[in-house]
Amino acid sequence: MPTRSRAPHTPRAVLFDAFGTLFDVYSVSTLAEQLFPGQGERLSMLWRDKQIEYSRLASMSGVQGERYRPFWEITRAGLRYAAQRLGLPMDAAAEDRLMNQYHHLSSFPENKPVLQALKARDIPAGILSNGDPQMLAVAVKSAGLDGLLDPLISVHETRRYKTDPAAYALGPAALKLPVRDILFVSSNGWDAIGATWYGYTTLWVNRAGLPLEQLDTEPTRIGSSLRAVLDFFPTPSNRTTP
């Protein structure tokens, strides 16, 4: 699918969503299939759906984050629900193996070259994620992306998950840039829309060719892989000398 563009703008920094965008949340299906033959894909998909649903429930219920639970706990709760919903006999050992796999999710193959290209162009690149700080640090290290992503921003301190404005506000505060000057990149359509509403320049990485969310809002651009990030920035040879 070709990249779609709504408005030309050259951002000054990039923030990536982590889970689903940099790290393949469905790569857990390989281990899940080994543990529960014939159910690996269904388990991984239902697990992810419940993880996101629980994050929204925690953000939207109560006041001042009183229903907040760390993302690691929400992830475990989602796994337990998915296993029960599918009638899978998941014991504590299998649960721990699947949870540990979340620390070692597969990284999409284009990630490292894209991040290296951004670094070569002196474009700051970091993460803004629902994930807990430890989850992010371990995932980045496991994927071999050390030194290519800074800052690693977790919503944990806000006790609010995306798409709450308090979560998106962490990006401009950390980078000390106007929100429009930050490119927010997500493979989750709902996340790209939420960031667009907040004011980011946005890229939806639509790897699966899904339809656009029907909320009368489009991300700034839509691409089919993380390589579309580089379309926002001139190559070094095209830069003009001040």
Image (spheres, rainbow, N blue to C red):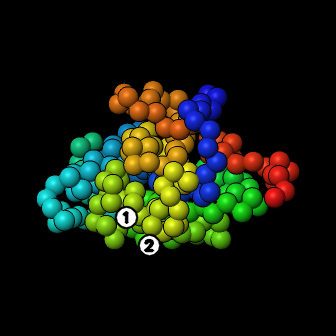
Position of 171 compared to 142: left or right?
left
| Residue at position x 81%, y 52% in the image | 239
Across and down, in percent, residue 140 comes to 56, 66
The residue that appears at 39% across and 43% down in the rendered structure is 197
Q: Which residue is at the front of the view, 237 or 47?
A: 237
Give the alpha-carbon distance from disc 1 to disc 2, as whole Å.
12 Å
* Disc 1: which residue: 155
Q: Which image quarter: residue 115? A: bottom right
Q: Is residue 229 above or below residue 140?
A: above
Reply above or below: 111 against 2: below
Q: Position of residue 185 (x, y in %)?
A: 53, 48
Q: Secondary structure at mark 2?
A: helix
Query: Where is the N terminus found, in terms of image quarters?
Result: top right
> Counting residues from the N terminus, which is met first, the one under dot 1 or under dot 2?
2
Image vertical order of residue 214 relative to residue 48, above or below: above
Q: What SS does tag 1 mark? A: helix
Q: Is residue 132 visible?
A: yes
Q: Position of residue 85 (x, y in %)?
A: 23, 43
Q: How many marks?
A: 2
Kind of residue at disc 2: Gln
Residue 40: x percent and y percent? 42, 44
Q: Which residue is mark 2?
A: 134
Tell me: residue 86, above or below residue 137.
Answer: above
Q: Amino acid at mark 1?
A: Val
